[in-house]
Structures are given as C-alpha cells and as structure tokens.
Image (spheres, rainbow, N blue to C red):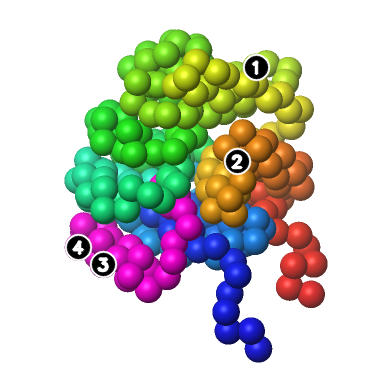
C-alpha cells in the first residue's frame, strides 16, 4: 500500500447541499476527477433539492475556523476553493483565515443564488465578497447574474461588470448560460487588460451545481500547477462534459455527472 499520496490537497469552504447536486459534494467529485484530494470544510447547511433552496443556516465562525485550520495544520494544501458563505460574518471569517495563507491559489465562486433562483445570502454578502475576498483571489468565477450583483449593475453586460470588478481582483471568469444566446460565452478578463472568450454549445435543460463544478475543477487544475488560461480551458471543457452527461435525479434541474460510470468498478 502506498501511504504517500501524490494527489494535491484542495481546501473547500462551502455549503452542504443534501441533494448532492451542488455544494461540497460537487466540489469533492469534481476535484477527484482532476486527480486531486478534496478537504471539505462546511460553512453552511442548506435545505434544498434539485428544484430550489428553501432555507439555510450559516455555521459559527469558530467551527469553520477549526475545520479549516485542522486541514491547514495537517496537510500541505495546494489550493483553496470558496463557495457558499451565506453571511457577512462568514465572509470576514474566511478573509481572516486566508490572510494567513496568501501564497495559496484561491478560486472564489461567489455563490449568491441557487440554480432555481433562491437566495443563498443577502446582496450585502455579495458586496462583502467583492471588498474582502476578491482582492485575495487568484480568480473569481461568477455567472453573469452574480457578476451583476457584485458590480451593482442590474442590467450590466459582462464587459461592463468586468470593468467594475477588475479593480478588486486579478482575474475574472464570467460564465454564460443565463441568456438566450445560441452559444454560451465564457469570458476571462485579467487586470492587465487581456481577455479571452471560449464558446461552447448550449445544452437543453438547466443544471444544478454547474458553477460549483467549474470552480472546483479550476481549483484542481491550479493545484496541479497548470497555468491559468490553460486551467480555465481544462475546467470549462470538463464542466461541459459533465453537463452533456447530466442526469435528472429529482423533479427539478439536471445534476452534472462529474465522475464516470465505471469510477468504482
């Protein structure tokens, strides 16, 4: 038995989704698929299914700090992925934690809405993420509705939101899929003025956990040492495949298939 793991450890700070479509389960599966080990620290508990979220509870800061520090003090963490935080107090807690580890690549997925549209925190949480966490992030991965909340531009385009948000973060990946465009545009913006757009085929239906899947896959690619633009492309390609193969496990949105069917065989 090989007791020395070569898999990079990625610390995930996010919420628990009992449907298994999003949140920490999505993080774990997506990171396993990249060849990484997920270390999940729970920030919030939710009541949700594949249709929508009905309630959530943010954990006490002491519990979250204890979970994260247990991992950081025990393992050589290679990257950090942030998901649902749910409150301004939790944003402050995570910012305090990350300030002590500035060398770690950080993917910030500003989870502010569930796939069904239900809120996972007040808009003020989004503003706190913008002010406190985006400056610490290697890259932030909002979808366009989340980018509009962060930028305080209710009808803003991706370009307009990026112009407002790049003073806060080094790199910004604004994902498409929420409009009626034939092809989905995923746009990467960098503070140095460069940008790149990846197009992918729009798939029928709607999906639960696609943003968590993308952000976790990206964190995994960075943990493996992949360069940013290549990591973004790898994560986008992987996420599209999970949506292409998605399953309807409940009465609502499709759940991405993040692991192959023969994974445990």
Q: Name the residue that disc number 4 marks.
A: 62
Q: Name the residue that disc number 2 marks.
A: 227
Tag 1–tag 3 contact (CB < 8 Å) = no
Looking at the image, can residue 24 be seen? no
Q: Earlier in the sequence, mark 1 or mark 4?
A: 4
Q: Name the residue that disc number 1 marks.
A: 180
Residue drawn 76% across the image and 27% down it: 201
Give the CA separation, mark 2 to mark 3: 31 Å
- Residue 73, relative to residue 147: is it above or below? below
Tag 3–tag 4 contact (CB < 8 Å) = yes
Q: Earlier in the sequence, mark 1 or mark 3?
A: 3
The part of the chain drawn in magenta is: 59-82
Question: Residue 66, labelled with which disc?
Answer: 3
Give the CA separation, mark 3 to mark 4: 6 Å
- Secondary structure, mark 3, is helix
> For the residue carrying disc 2, how many other residues have a C-alpha within 10 Å: few (<14), some (14-19), or many (20+)?
few
């Amino acid at each position: 038995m090989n007791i020395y793991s070569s898999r990079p450890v990625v610390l995930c700070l996010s919420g628990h989704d009992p449907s298994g479509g999003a949140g920490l389960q999505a993080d774990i599966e997506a990171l396993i698929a990249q060849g990484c080990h997920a270390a999940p620290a729970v920030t919030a508990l939710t009541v949700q299914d594949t249709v929508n979220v009905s309630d959530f509870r943010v954990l006490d800061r002491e519990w979250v700090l204890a979970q994260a520090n247990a991992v950081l003090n025990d393992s050589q963490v290679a990257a950090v992925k942030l998901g649902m935080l749910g409150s301004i107090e939790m944003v402050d807690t995570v910012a305090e934690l990350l300030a002590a580890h500035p060398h770690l690549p950080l993917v910030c997925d500003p989870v502010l809405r569930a796939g069904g549209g239900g809120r996972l925190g007040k808009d003020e949480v989004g503003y706190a993420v913008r002010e406190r966490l985006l400056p610490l992030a290697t890259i932030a991965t909002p979808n366009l509705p989340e980018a509009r909340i962060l930028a305080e531009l209710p009808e803003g385009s991706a370009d307009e939101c990026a112009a407002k948000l790049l003073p806060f973060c080094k790199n910004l990946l604004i994902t498409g899929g929420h409009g009626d465009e034939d092809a989905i545009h995923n746009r990467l913006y960098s503070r140095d003025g460069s940008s790149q757009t990846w197009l992918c085929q729009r798939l029928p239906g709607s999906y639960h956990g696609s943003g968590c899947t993308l952000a976790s896959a990206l964190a995994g690619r960075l943990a493996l040492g992949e360069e940013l633009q290549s990591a973004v492309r790898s994560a986008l390609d992987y996420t599209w495949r999970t949506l292409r193969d998605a399953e309807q496990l409940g009465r609502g949105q499709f759940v991405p298939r993040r692991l192959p069917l023969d994974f445990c065989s």
